Image (tube, grey):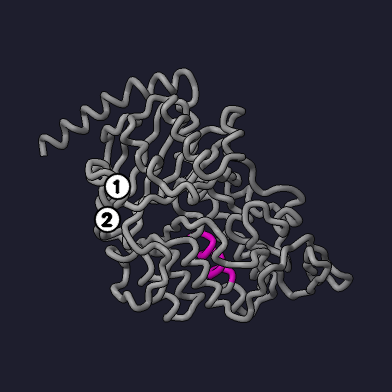
Amino acid sequence: MFDRDTDVAATGGYHITLDERAQSALRRLVAPEIMRRLLASSSALRLRDRDMFWDYRGRVLGHGPDLSGSASIDVDRITLRTLLAEAAGEDLHLGRAVSGIAVDEHGMPRVMFADGTSVTADLVVGADGTHSVVARYLAAGPTSHPAGIIGFSGRTPRAGLTAAERHRLGTRSSMAIGPRGAALYVGFLDPVGNAALDAPELSTSITTGPTYIWGAMFPESARTDFLRDLHGTALRTALLDRFREHRWAGHTLEVIARTDPGSVAAFRFNAASTRAADLTPWAAGRITALGDAVHATPPTAGMGAGAAIQDAADLLAQLDGTTAITDAIGRYEAQLRQRGGEVLTAAMKTVRLILATDTTLGAVATAALSPVVAAATRLRRSQK
């Protein structure tokens, strides 16, 4: 197992959602003790307030589903990566960036590394993300493209907000979309107070108190390109200015204004085709891929990491059989295509909604309909 990173903790400190299917798959991949430590380090969705949808002025538009029976969890990305690296043990080799793929004279796959070394294997699985070298070799081109959205994330301790904004946001995740494609997601993470497993002695979470993990989103354009070159306080200020240009209420931006500038980072949304038939456009063989390398998924559905874990579990299940490797890979890739199409369809719904507001008609409709929907929501609540 080779990874280009030299430090598994050197990644964005944001959160990943794992639903019941992803957790079930992970249990087939790691030891029970790793799962216990993961749950002890995770925030249980069933303990959160019900999710909420806002408009750009902070008015309530609706609520998400009842999560009281949900088995889903949120976990810090760094925490998950650290636990998975521990599970891999000595089989994980860091600092090995893949530079190319080839097949030798015996039909066996060979992996070349940037340091000039190479290895030959019975099976190569590319889990190297959106810009996968392995999947690009298989598909003879990129397997995903920019989705038209640029995102920015940060972390804000709940205690750093005013009492009024803490009350408004609550202990929930929420989403707001305004005119011209400006959107703001605010997730809630509390692996201590809302731990999925009450075993603090097993917790390895980097988040030690109630925290909002926020994501700002804008359509990609010449007006947003410069934001990718900014960092820290300059980037935070530019994001606030961008929202204010679109008349967002000041209190809705408090979660950004009071964030740690060092936690703010930019990332582009990439997406593969939502058509399952378009995924894995290659013949099954001794080289395959999984996760974002095949079905790059925007974070708008919170399903990308979970889908990758399910991919890995399905692959191992197929390889445990007695059939030829290529037959096992063929069955695995059929499952991969179906799952990838499902998660991409869910994620792209929000992306398309955001982009739809970035037109003259969409902007007018968003501004005009928001107060109407908010008034109807208030009326329904008052009648209960």
Camera sees residue 241: yes
Q: Are marks 2 and 1 in contact (CB under 8 Å)?
A: yes
Q: Is residue 77 left or right of residue 2?
A: left
Q: Which residue is depicted at the point 69% across and 73% down?
A: 325
Q: Is residue 45 above or below residue 246?
A: below
Q: Secondary structure at mark 1?
A: loop
* Quarter assignment of residue 103: bottom right
Q: Which residue is depicted at the point 63% across and 75% down?
A: 92
Given the image, on which type of amino acid does mark 2 rest?
Answer: Arg
Which mark, residue 48? 2
Residue 173 magenta: no
Report the quarter where the N terminus lies. Answer: bottom right
Instruction: Calculate the distance from the C-alpha at mark 2 to the C-alpha at mark 1.
Output: 8 Å
Horizontal and vertical percent for residue 280? 66, 54
Horizontal and vertical percent for residue 11? 55, 59
Which mark, residue 51? 1
Q: Secondary structure at mark 2?
A: loop
Q: Is residue 16 left or right of residue 296?
A: left
* Quarter assignment of residue 248: top left
Q: Residue furthest front?
A: 233
Q: Which residue is depicted at the point 52% across and 39% down?
A: 235
Q: Nearer the viewer, residue 60 or 125?
A: 60
At label 1, counting other C-alpha atoms closer than 10 Å, the crowd grade (few under 14, some 14-19, many 20 or more) is many
Q: Is residue 7 left or right of residue 343?
A: right
Camera sees residue 274: no
What's the magenta bit mostly, secondary-structure-wise? helix
Given the image, on which type of amino acid does mark 1 rest?
Answer: Asp
Horizontal and vertical percent for residue 110? 80, 69
Q: Residue furthest left?
A: 383
**What residue span does the magenta drawing correspond to?**
306-315
